[in-house]
Amino acid sequence: MYDYRRLTPEQKETVLALRKRQGYPLHEPPHFRDLKGWFLISASTYEHKHHFEREEDRAGLVDDLLKELKDAEIPCVGWVVLPNHYHLLVKCQPLRVVGAPLGRTHGRTSRLVNRRAGFEGRQVWYRYSDRQIRSQAHYYASLNYIHINPVKHGYVEKPLNWPCSSVHWYLEHFGIEWLRETWKKHPVGDYGRGWDW
């Protein structure tokens, strides 16, 4: 994400010219805002700083996110919140509707984090990215990826050991066998390599 900072001025000029020709925003990932369907939404803190190390802060962040999405009538079927990023599996009709609720949550949580640290106006979040779900297999692989994310990043040994995840909802409503079968049928593999934080 921060590779742009390491480019030479000439390389930056080339990248920006290409993005302009493609009609992409110059300094953010392209969001094809009229697309409809299921999306994996990922957001990270600015420079990947761990602003949400405390469990109560992560719980507050997920509560805020889920409330905003519910109020915007955006179904969210999977989530995980870590100290420096989160992932959501949401259905958008169209994609552009997700920006406002995420922005409100990012604004509120930024103010909270900054107030607690004695800062004002410091950037806490660094935008979000989206990946459209292409198939049923992609949907379940994305859900599994969300649930394995705390393990992938070394926070816990098992997904069920991370409290701030939708895996607990699935365990309660579908059971451990469903989780195991879904994992076997839709393995994550190298999902997220090169883009996950």
Image: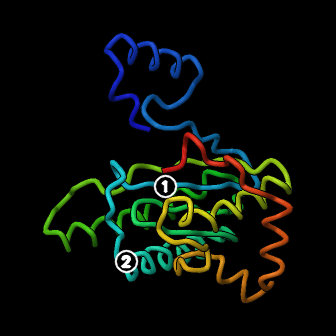
Q: Is residue 181 above or below residue 90?
A: below
**What is the number of callouts on the image?**
2
**Mark 2 or 1 closer to N-term?**
1
Image position, residue 12 (x, y; %): 38, 18
Distance from disc 2 to disc 1, alpha carbons, whole Å, reads 16 Å
Q: Which residue is mark 1?
A: 43
User: Of 194 and 91, which appears nearest the observer?
Assistant: 194
**Disc 2, SS:** helix
User: Of 51 and 158, which appears nearest the observer?
Assistant: 158
Q: Residues within 10 Å of mark 1 (few under 14, many from 20)?
A: many
Give the residue at x 72% y 89%: 172
Image position, residue 146 (x, y; %): 63, 63
Determine which quarter of the picture holds residue 152.
bottom right
Q: Given contact means CB atoms under 8 Å apart, are the residues at marks 2 and 1 in contact?
A: no
- Looking at the rendered image, the quarter that the N terminus falls into is top left
Image position, residue 173 (x, y; %): 77, 87
Q: Is residue 93 above or below residue 47?
A: below
Q: In this rendering, would 52 be left or right of 115?
A: right
Q: Residues within 10 Å of mark 2 (few under 14, many from 20)?
A: some
Image position, residue 5 (x, y; %): 33, 29
Give the residue at x 79% y 52%: 138
Residue most extreme to the top = 10
Q: Which residue is mark 2?
A: 57
Give the residue at x 35% y 71%: 53
Give the residue at x 67% y 63%: 90
Residue most extreme to the left = 118
Type of amino acid at the residue the image marks with label 1: Ala
Q: In this rendering, would 126 be left or right of 181?
A: left
